[in-house]
């Protein structure tokens, strides 16, 4: 496996700027116009890709009122799983228009499939990549089916332990996926920043040797930017037109202006990482003159000894470095030296 993958002619991973994915999820709130507006907003904000979710209620759960199918807490309390997904899904008949619109705008669009029929639909649309959602990371048959397409795959690891992550990776590799990335994730909606334990992301990079990123469910951008500083190559964030829109995912999503800030700040954080360097930065060069150096603080006659009374370490930095002070003291001036003259070896007598 490589530390770089390529989605829609965009390289992601080592040496590449962060890849920002705007997750629409259910934030279209049943309106294709909202979905199109979100794609447009994501493009305008600078996101690299937009992601949707491809399922129907009957491909992800059963229409049942049994207790285990009822949601008792959190944002979606009082609904059955079927009711939630029936209200939240992206109609399959929208997909062609969404893909065509994204292509026209020049922004990448791909999806999270939740069963084989969704993969088949997305293949017909020539999706450039696939995302496996955290809840499906243990669905090894689905991962195997996606891997067989030969497309790049991103697996979100929320709730998965090390063994489950490794099983998902091994399944994807053995089924033919040669471009694989994983995302550290906390599957809480929203998730507090304190739950993210971002050092885990660093460990995942070392342990699994893959392109690694973050699926961020916190309510601001701080965690995502911190992840970029720790080496995250991908950041996925839920995006909505209106956080107060009342949809299933609106309340823990960011709005377009915040997405724009995320894209800009992630780029800044990545640029700041740079490479290992102990040389002067370009912005420092003009200030180098203001470092300390050795200067005559009095008029000094030719032949006179240099002392701590007539030589000082001061700013600016046009004289010898202060480390030579002890070596200069006790030597004699080779010429008359005026006050405020930088001390150089050329005016020091060695005789």
Image (cartoon, rainbow, N blue to C red):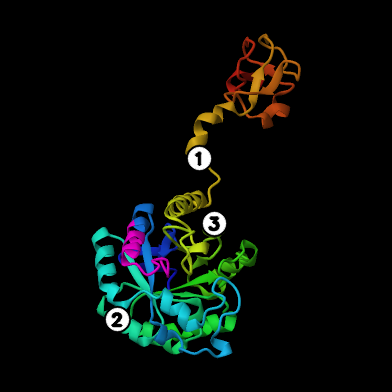
Looking at the rendering, in which quadrant would you find the C terminus? top right
Is disc 1 surrounded by few (<14), some (14 to 19) or many (20+) residues within 10 Å?
Answer: few
Tell me residue 6's x, y (percent): 35, 68
The residue tagged 3 is 220
Q: Residue at left 44%, top 57%?
A: 242
Q: Is residue 306 above or below residue 322?
A: above
Do residues under tags 1 and 3 come within 8 Å of each other at their CB atoms? Answer: no
Q: Residue at left 49%, top 90%?
A: 64
The residue tagged 1 is 281
Range of residues picked out in magenta: 24-40
For marks 3 and 2, the one nearer the N-term is 2
Tell me residue 283's x, y (percent): 49, 36
Would you identify the image quadrant in which residue 58 lies?
bottom left
For marks 1 and 3, the one nearer the N-term is 3
- Mark 1 vs mark 2, foreground winner is 2
- Mark 1 vs mark 3, foreground winner is 3
For marks 1 and 2, the one nearer the N-term is 2
Tell me residue 219's x, y (percent): 55, 59
The residue tagged 2 is 121
Q: Is residue 260 above or below residue 213?
A: above
């Amino acid at each position: 496996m490589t530390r770089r993958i390529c989605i829609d002619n965009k390289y992601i991973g080592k040496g590449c700027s962060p890849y920002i994915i705007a997750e629409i999820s259910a934030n279209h709130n049943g309106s294709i116009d909202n979905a199109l507006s979100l794609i447009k907003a994501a493009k305008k904000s600078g996101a690299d890709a937009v992601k949707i979710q491809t399922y129907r209620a009957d491909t992800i759960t059963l229409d049942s009122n049994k207790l285990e199918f009822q949601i008792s807490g959190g944002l979606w309390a009082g609904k059955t799983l079927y009711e939630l997904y029936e209200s939240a899904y992206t109609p399959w008949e929208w997909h062609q228009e969404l893909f065509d619109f994204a292509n026209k705008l020049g922004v990448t669009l791909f999806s999270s499939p939740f069963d084989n029929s969704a993969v088949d639909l997305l293949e017909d649309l020539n999706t450039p990549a696939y995302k496996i959602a955290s809840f499906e990371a243990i669905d090894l048959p689905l991962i195997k089916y996606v891997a067989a397409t030969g497309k790049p795959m991103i697996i979100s690891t929320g709730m998965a332990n090390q063994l489950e992550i490794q099983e998902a990776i091994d399944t994807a590799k053995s089924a033919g996926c040669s471009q694989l990335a994983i995302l550290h994730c906390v599957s809480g909606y929203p998730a507090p920043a304190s739950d993210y334990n971002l050092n885990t992301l660093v460990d995942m990079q070392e342990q699994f040797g893959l392109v690694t990123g973050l699926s961020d469910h916190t309510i601001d951008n701080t965690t995502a930017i911190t992840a970029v500083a720790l080496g995250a190559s991908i950041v996925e964030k839920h995006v909505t037109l209106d956080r107060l829109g009342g949809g299933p995912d609106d309340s823990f999503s960011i709005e377009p202006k915040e997405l724009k800030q995320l894209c800009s700040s992630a780029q800044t954080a990545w640029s700041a990482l740079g490479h290992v360097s102990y040389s002067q930065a370009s912005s420092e060069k003009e200030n180098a003159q203001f470092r300390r150096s050795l200067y005559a603080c009095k008029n000094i006659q030719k032949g006179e000894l240099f002392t701590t009374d007539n030589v000082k370490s001061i700013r600016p930095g046009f004289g010898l470095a202060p480390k030579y002070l002890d070596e200069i003291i006790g030597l004699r001036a080779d010429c008359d030296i005026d006050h405020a003259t930088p001390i150089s070896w050329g005016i020091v007598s060695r005789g």
